[in-house]
Structure formats: C-alpha cells, structure tokens
Amino acid sequence: MMEKQKGSKYRRWTMILVIVVPLLLLLMLRQIITFRNNEAAFEKLSQGRVVLNSTHHSFEFFKDNTTVCEPREIRLKAIEQIRQNHATMVKVNNTTDMGDASVTLNERILKNLKDLNEKQLCLSYKQHKNIFLRKDKVIAWAKNNQTHDDAQSLLYSIKRGNRNEYFAYILNDKYAFLHIFKNGGSSVEAQLGRDHVRPSQVKNRGLLATLRDPIDHFLSGWSECGTRHEVPHTSIDSTFDERIQMWLDHIYSCRRNRAGFSFKGACACIIHSLPQVNFLLSLFTKNKIAGKIDLLGDLKELPELLRFAGFQYNNSIPSARVHAQRKSNHKYPRNRTLISKETMRNICHFVRLDYYLLWFEPPPICREKIKSDLKLINDFSFD
C-alpha cells in the first residue's frame, strides 16, 4: 500500500515537472527575445523614427533628444568665434568710421544657434551658423580688398517697393518674417491671410528669414518675371541658355543705372533674382547685416522654422503660387542642366556673395573659383 502511494506521488511530480518546466523555459525564451527586439529598436533611434507594434498597442519612438546637429564643443567654438569677430569689427569701426561702433551683439543670435541645434533643424542650423560666423569677415574683405566698383557690386541694400512696403510679415509679438523675394513669402502670406508691413511696423520684433540654393533662387526670379510681369529680355524665341544670359545682362544693366535703393520701370522685377544676402543688408549701413535679424534658416524647413519662432503653421493651407508655378515651369523652366558652363560661371559670379555666406554647394564649374575666394576671405585679417 505504501509503495503504491509513493509511486502515485512520484508520477504526479513527474507530470508537474514535464508540464511546468517547458512552460517556464518558453516564458524565459520569450522574455529574452522581447528584450533583444527592444534593444535593437532603441539602437535605431539615433537613425530616425521607429514604430513598434503589438496586438494591443502602437508605440512611436522619435529621435533621442540628446541627438543634435553638431556636438556641443563645435557649437561653443562657433559661438566664441562669432563673439570674437563681432568684437574685432566694433574695434575696426571705431578706428575707421565704417559703421556704428556702439552696436552690441544680439544675444538671441547665439541662443537661436543653440536651440536650432537641439531641435535638430540641421539645415537651418547650418545656414544660421554660417552667415553669422562669416559675415563680419566677408563684408570687411569686400570693402577693403576689392576695388570700389567690385565692392559696390557686392554690398548693396535692397528696398522692397518704392516705400519698402513689402518688407516683412508680422508673425506674432516676437517675430516678423523678413521677405526675401522667392523665398517663401507667398506661403507665409497664405498662412497669415494678411499683407506685408513696412520696417517701422515691425517695431521691437526680431526678424527671421529663409534661404535657398542661390542658382535655384536666381532661376526662380527669372521665371517669376517672365510669367507674371512679361519683362523684356525673357524672349521664348531664343535658346534656354541665351534667355538666361539675356536676363543676367538685363540685371547688370539695371544695376549700373540704379538710382537710390529701388528699381523702377522695366528694372522693377529684377529684385526677384538678386542675391539673397543683399536682402539682409541694412538699408542705411551697408557694411552689416540688419541688426534685428536673429534667426536664419533653410527654406526646406519653413514650416518647422515658423513653429520654432512660435507661429502655428497649418500644413493644410496651400501656397497661393501653386498654379503660377505650374504655368511658369512650362514656359520658363528652371532646368540648370540646359545652362552652358560659361553662363553658369556668370551666374555664380553674380550671386557669389550668397556662396560666400550661405551653406550651399556651388555648381561643379564654379566650385574652384568660390573655394579660392573663400580662402582669400579666410586668410584676410580685418583687425
């Protein structure tokens, strides 16, 4: 009897072990697999967005907040260099009367550099950093190491309309959007539902502006003027390359005959193709970037940049220029592959100030010349 009880007890324990042990092993294996999957997913966070799905939940993971466009040490070095360049420029202005020596560095420039980096608006971060890092030296080099005519062909301000009535758009109490023609103005106007303001109406707001590839900007201005304003020198009877060169010749002719800050008559439309940096120069002190500008970014990041400035961008609102762009692309295509090497070199020379200051790669045919100019600028000592 005792032996039967022992045998029965033994069989029960055997059955328990046979059932329980495999279940425990399966649970352990499942935990190991889950852990490894999660580990692999988190390793991908630095590369972009990862979505983990289960039968019950959907979790979305975005880039780690510690990921930035550039390491902190590089950003701090850039900030220190901006401070040094500004101090040197103030010193030079004191001794040469080149400008307002009392102007202090706008600290929001440096704060925005830090915040753009941390928000991972990397295209805008590069533009913002590049222009504020280079502007003092580039402008001083242009005024000191070139003939008067060459410097004048680079450093001129642009008046937007006869009374500067197309100057900017008020975004909020903190910022106004500085209107560089062909750089997102129509999109901003569609978002706001209201028109431009003059400089006096900006008051104490900071100015933000967007920037784009210099060749694309030039061609977009040519297309705009040919489509909407029926400007001469944009005849469709010539080859594409000839039409572009005629437009450039027309711009140079208008520049030579310019009186004051604005262009009139047949020259009024050339403003759409002028270098973007000239829109940033102060109307009254051409050797510096306008003091209220403290946020610069890339046009490709326009919605994010406006949100960064505290404006609620609505993705569902289309730009007012969508239909016009389709029309202009037909008669005035912006195809740079149809431009000859000689004409491309001429355009690069015309917009060279943009390449000196902005973070854009020049066309291959222009690369060595721009690189050579930048070396001269970098070696220039303005203290």
Image: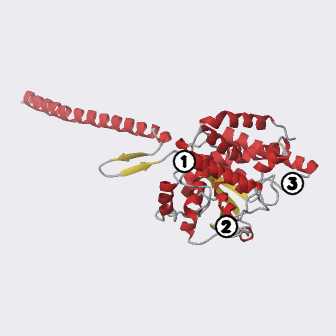
- Residue 39 horizontal side relative to residue 350, left or right: left
Of the numbered discs 2 and 1, the one sitting upstream in the chain is 2
- Residue holding disc 3: 99
Instruction: Indicate left or right for 261 with 319 as reference.
Output: right
Within 10 Å of disc 1 (Cα), the crowding (few <14, some 14-19, many 20+) is many
Give me the C-alpha separation between circle 2 and circle 3: 26 Å
Give yes or no for contact between labels 2 and 3 (Cβ–Cβ under 8 Å).
no
- Which color scheme did the rendering employ for the protein? secondary structure
Three-letter amino acid code of the residue under disc 3? Gly
Q: Name the residue under label 2.
A: 166
Relative to residue 369, is residue 18 drawn left or right?
left
Residue at horizontal 65 percent and vertical 47 percent from the top: 127
Q: Is mark 3 on a helix, strand or loop?
A: loop
At label 1, which amino acid type do we have?
Phe
Q: Which of 341 and 153 is in front in this view?
A: 341
* Residue that numbered label 1 is attached to: 240
Query: Do we see residue 117 in this rendering?
Result: no
Q: Earlier in the sequence, mark 2 or mark 3?
A: 3
The quadrant where residue 42 appears: top left
Whichever of labels 1 and 3 marks the residue nearer the N terminus, that label is 3
Q: Which of marks 2 and 1 is in front?
A: 1
* Dot 2: element: loop
